[in-house]
Image: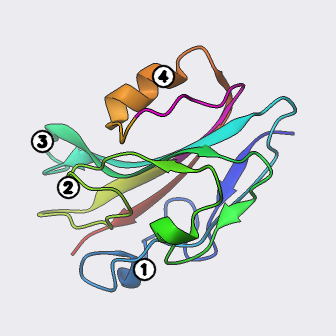
């Protein structure tokens, strides 16, 4: 079985509803997944936008949310997931607003793509003390069993 990531709020390639963006409630969308491979010891979720600041001339990938050490038996995250509601053992990384937690789409110009990436790892990562995306990805190297991507778009 292959790892699959979905949301009841939007389908692959569709527009992310405004309530999950800075123009709305800026809450995380509901996410669910299936097909976690045998041998998975933890899951990682990275949400980012490779089209920042302008999709016609991208200069960086803006990180919106980083979670790691999600328990492998977890099958999703509810809408409006807060730090206090995260499954036991889950740790958070630092997004590009220099804080933990979800920060919704807020593009300055144009229609951006937002990638929700779920990774199944063969290990539980050490406490990385609120890592940024590069630190988290470095720690994951050599431990990825499978990955799933859900991409949505948004334009103000």
Q: Earlier in the sequence, mark 4 or mark 1?
A: 1
Q: Residue at x 41, y 77 (%)?
A: 27
Q: Nearer the viewer, residue 22 or 127?
A: 127
Q: Nearer the viewer, mark 4 or mark 1?
A: 4
Q: CA distance from mark 2 to mark 3?
A: 21 Å
Q: Earlier in the sequence, mark 2 or mark 4?
A: 2
Is residue 121 on the magenta stretch? yes
- Label 1 SS: loop
Q: Earlier in the sequence, mark 3 or mark 4?
A: 3
Label annotation for residue 139? 4
Q: Nearer the viewer, mark 2 or mark 3?
A: 2
Q: Quadrant of residue 50?
A: top left
- Crowd class of label 3 (few under 14; some 14 to 19; many from 20; radius 10 Å): few
Q: Nearer the viewer, residue 112 or 5?
A: 5
Which residue is denoted by mark 3 in the rendering? 57
Label annotation for residue 97? 2
Please say if 102 is above or below 56. Answer: below
Q: Nearer the viewer, mark 1 or mark 2?
A: 2
Q: Nearer the viewer, residue 7 or 156?
A: 7
Residue 64, percent from left and from top: 33, 55
Look at the image and give the residue range highlighted in magenta. Answer: 117-128
Q: Are marks 1 and 2 in contact (CB under 8 Å)?
A: no
Q: Nearer the viewer, mark 3 or mark 4?
A: 4
Q: Is residue 148 visible?
A: no
């Amino acid at each position: 079985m292959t790892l699959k990531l979905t949301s009841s709020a939007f389908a692959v390639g569709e527009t992310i509803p405004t309530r999950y963006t800075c123009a709305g409630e800026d809450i995380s969308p509901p996410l669910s997944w299936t097909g976690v491979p045998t041998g998975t010891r933890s899951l990682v979720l990275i949400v980012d936008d490779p089209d920042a600041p302008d999709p016609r001339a991208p200069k960086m990938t803006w990180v919106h949310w980083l979670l790691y050490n999600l328990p492998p038996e977890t099958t999703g995250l509810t809408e409006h997931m807060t730090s206090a509601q995260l499954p036991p053992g889950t740790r958070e990384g630092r997004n590009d607003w220099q804080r933990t937690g979800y920060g919704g789409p807020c593009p300055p110009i144009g229609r951006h793509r937002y990638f929700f990436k779920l990774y199944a790892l063969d290990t539980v990562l050490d406490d990385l003390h609120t890592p940024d995306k590069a630190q988290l990805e470095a720690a994951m190297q050599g431990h990825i069993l499978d990955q799933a991507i859900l991409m949505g778009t948004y334009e103000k």
